[in-house]
Image (spheres, helix red, strand yellow):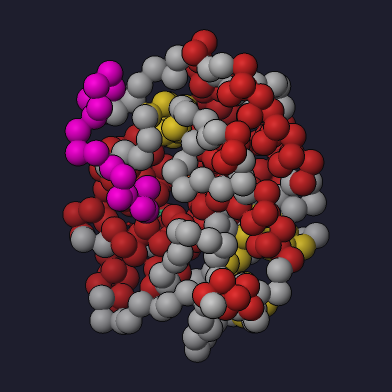
Amino acid sequence: MADDTHVLDAPPAGASADWTIPQDWSHYTPEEHATWDKLFERQSQLLPGRASNAYLRGLDVLKLSRPGIPDFEELSDRLMKLTGWQVVAVPGLVPDDVFFDHMANRRFVAGNFIRRPDQLDYLQEPDVFHDVFGHVPMLADPVFADYLEAYGKGGQRALELGALKQLGRLYWYTVEFGLVAEPEGLRIYGAGIVSSHSETRFALTSDSPHRIGFDLARVMRTEYRIDDFQQNYFVIPSFDELLRATVETDFAPLYGELLSQPDIPVGTIVDGDKVITNGTQGYARSKAL
Ligand code: PHE
Ligand code: FE
């Protein structure tokens, strides 16, 4: 949602006014199911000991290990019983207000197409693997489920306050690329990481990126890149803490203060950062050559 360059301004033919479409599960080809299975197997082998406990629990209780692309209706039934969320299909990226409205009402919008077999490792648009494998397990966690609903409401407010850029960064650095410090060590929970074979390892073990303790204002000032591995990750102490720092804070005065402060480029450490890893930035530098 943060990168809205591909968004249309009206629902495409066949979509409802709220931009949803039928998932039309029976139309997936055997090859498409096989792509899911391949991605699923690769990632689910890698994630124990790397993904947060909340994520792994979600993967398990939602029975995502069953072969094939999940049927959203069935998935929504399970999710509804656990946390009251549903998964609805959309053709691709949707406008911000549509995205926030679904989220504020506990509906997670998921792309229903799947990447081609030659795109297993990288794809810029969110497909069903990213959206379902990456995001939906966290929705089975009651605390994270509340966080995302509050985020949707916060989005509607940010639209009115002209603070979409700041709020979008919070999404990016938590929902998409967040790390959490668990008693056993750092773990990933952001969907952009858990759905990426290469970034799963990079985010946790590369000496290149900075890993910085989560601070709301700091995150909202930080730029991000959408074309390669992140140059900084933000680490929350727990999901309860994330909820406290966001749901229980009124963002309006904060947005006002942020207007007078410069944005922070990626890959920088600033005064006041709780630095967990001071990265070499070697990976980003080698790519920039
Ligand atoms: N508390 C935020 C506000 O006042 C809303 C919000 C909650 C935003 C949780 C993001 C996440 O706008
Ligand atoms: Fe996503």
Q: Is residue 242 visible?
A: no
Q: What x and y, as percent, mark residue 227? A: 48, 59
| x 74%, y 46%: residue | 47
Residue 171 found in image quarter? bottom left
Residue 92 found in image quarter? top left
Assess whether residue 125 is covered by the magenta stretch. no
- Mark count: 0
Q: What x and y, as percent, mark residue 17? A: 22, 25
Asked if residue 288 lies left or right of residue 258, the reply is right
Q: What x and y, as percent, mark residue 44? A: 74, 39
Front residue (pair 198, 160): 198
Assess whether residue 6 is covered by the magenta stretch. yes
Type of secondary structure dominating the magenta stretch: loop
Check the image and name the residue furthest to the top: 26
Asked if residue 175 lies left or right of residue 20, the reply is right
Q: Range of the magenta residues?
A: 1-18
Q: Which quadrant holds the C terminus?
A: bottom right
- Residue 25 against residue 90 in the figure, above or below: above
Asked if residue 24 lies left or right of residue 252, the reply is right
Q: What x and y, as percent, mark residue 109? A: 41, 33
- Residue 105 against residue 165 in the figure, above or below: above
| x 52%, y 31%: residue | 114
Q: Is residue 272 visible?
A: yes
